[in-house]
Amino acid sequence: MTIASNVKQCLSTMKGIEAQLSSFALNSLDKDAQVTFNEAMLAVGEIKKDLQYRVLELERHEPQYMGS
């Protein structure tokens, strides 16, 4: 598996984690848990943005990674 494939797979996983944390935040009855899940979701969102930027960088500098 190439670096680009690994980064894209990681990005996909992070999107799933972000969605799951959002779901936990919405479905939790405990206010403290809601806040914790929301904060974790926001942190994962920042990591996701960094990974998206990295994918764009990989594709720009290494054209063979585009669309893979």
Image: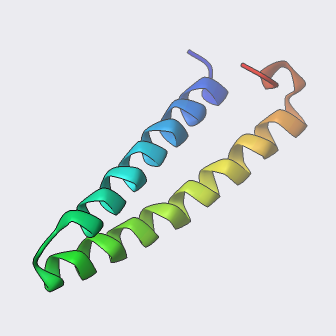
Q: Residue at x 88, y 37 (%)?
A: 61
Query: Is 63 located above or below residue 24 in the figure?
Result: above
Q: Quadrant of the N terminus?
A: top right
Q: Quadrant of residue 55?
A: top right
Q: How is the image coloured?
A: rainbow
> Percent from the top left, x then y, of residue 46?
54, 66
Horizontally, residue 58 falls left or right of residue 61, namely left
Q: Who is closer to the viewer here, 22 or 3?
A: 22
Query: Is 15 located above or below residue 67 in the figure?
Result: below
Q: Quadrant of the C terminus?
A: top right
Query: Is 21 located above or below residue 33 in the figure?
Result: above
> Percent from the top left, x then y, of residue 35?
26, 82
Horizontally, residue 36 falls left or right of residue 61, namely left
Q: Residue at x 80, y 45 (%)?
A: 57
> Percent from the top left, x then y, of residue 37?
27, 70
Q: Residue at x 41, y 43 (%)?
A: 16
Q: Who is closer to the viewer here, 29 or 37?
A: 29
Horizontally, residue 55 falls left or right of residue 29, namely right
Q: Say how many tags the image has.
A: 0
Horizontally, residue 67 falls left or right of residue 27, namely right
> Percent from the top left, x then y, of residue 44?
44, 61
Q: Residue at x 62, y 58 (%)?
A: 50
Name the residue furthest top: 1
